[in-house]
Amino acid sequence: MADRGVMVLTSDERDRYRASLDECVEWHHATKVRKMATAPMRPARAKLAAAAYKMLGGYVVEATARTFWGREMLVALPELVSCQIYSYGYFEADVAAFMLIAVKESMCVFDVGAHFGFFTLLAADLVGSGGEVHAFEPTPRTFAWLARNVSELPHVEVNRRAVWSRQTGLMFRDYGLVKAAFNSHFGARDGSVDSRQSEFSVRATTLEAYSQAMNRLPDFIKIDAESAELEVLHGLGERILRHQPLIALEVGDVAGLADVQPSRQAVEYLISHGYKCYECKSGHFRSHVPAEQYSYGNLFFVPISSRVVDELTDR
């Protein structure tokens, strides 16, 4: 693969990458006519891979995707996240936009729920060789793809562990490589996921224990833990909470999942520890008022005294 070295982004480059991200989002939502006229092959190949997967009984295509900031990564078509990155160069534009603002050179980043490594790679390039990225992905098959994508980045540490409120053993559900984004201790957030699954045991750590063992405090944490976000937050510990890292948090309430607390509790937990909450609408960040119930999405938490507050409100 090309482009595997460490990329250090200047302020001007960050602005260019934000413009590139906006262009990718715009093209993703463009009309079919425009897509066919400009760059028809990548979305078409992703759709063909999905059709082949159904016809051939589980055939997965390995492909190389180019991200919006120019890095290459391995993806598995027709896996959901992979298809979007392969076709359009991005996934979860709000998280990517927040990282372009918040993650600075030489920071330490914790990526909880790293999947194949899209945000791990973005963080690695934003912090540069003077920073560190610690990625957590518990599912063995998903972890293998993550490890391949970051294998030539010495400042990235990958951990095949779950993150939880205490150090323990957990049982996880694995819905297969194509549904890897929904693997979870609790069950899939997407009701359309096939009920067929395998289960595996995994060791879970807390971010507090991991931080102490590595002797590193995170400056930025991305949490996408498939309904376990509150458990992850309860494992931060006082040392990390006093440090007040910037946090990107997935939210989403799902009926019928046992023992899952509503996302509002996670939101209120961080607000009670001195954070201001933001949402991203149409590419712009604005203050968020906690809701009673949440559909799938992401929220962003910034310490009230942080300079990032001004950078977000300037957007």
Image (cartoon, rainbow, N blue to C red):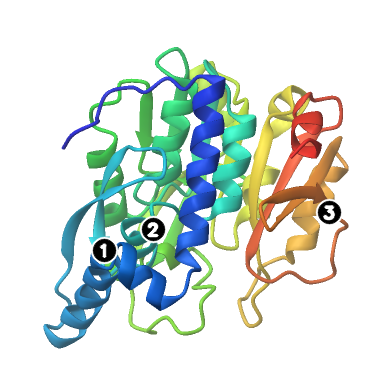
Residue type indicated by callout 3: His
Q: Residue at x 37, y 57 (%)?
A: 201
Q: Position of residue 186 (x, y in %)?
A: 53, 68
Mark linked to residue 42: 1
**Relative to 44, is 12 on the left or the right?**
right
- Quick one: SS at disc 2? helix
**Relative to 213, is 43 on the left or the right?**
left
Q: Residue at x 65, y 50 (%)?
A: 249
**On the image, numbered disc 3 is attached to which residue?**
288
Sequence order check: which comes first, mark 1 or mark 2?
A: 1
Q: Quadrant of the N terminus?
A: top left
Comparing 14 with 260, the one in front is 14
Visible residue check, residue 176: no
**On the image, numbered disc 2 is attached to which residue?**
88
Q: Residues within 10 Å of mark 1 (few under 14, many from 20)?
A: some
Disc 1 vs disc 2: Cβ atoms closer than 8 Å? yes
Q: Residues within 10 Å of mark 2 (few under 14, many from 20)?
A: many
Q: Residues within 10 Å of mark 3 (few under 14, many from 20)?
A: some
Up the image or down, 230 lies above or below 214; here it is below
**Relative to 18, is 7 on the left or the right?**
left
| Real-space Cα separation, disc 1 to disc 2, in angstroms | 8 Å
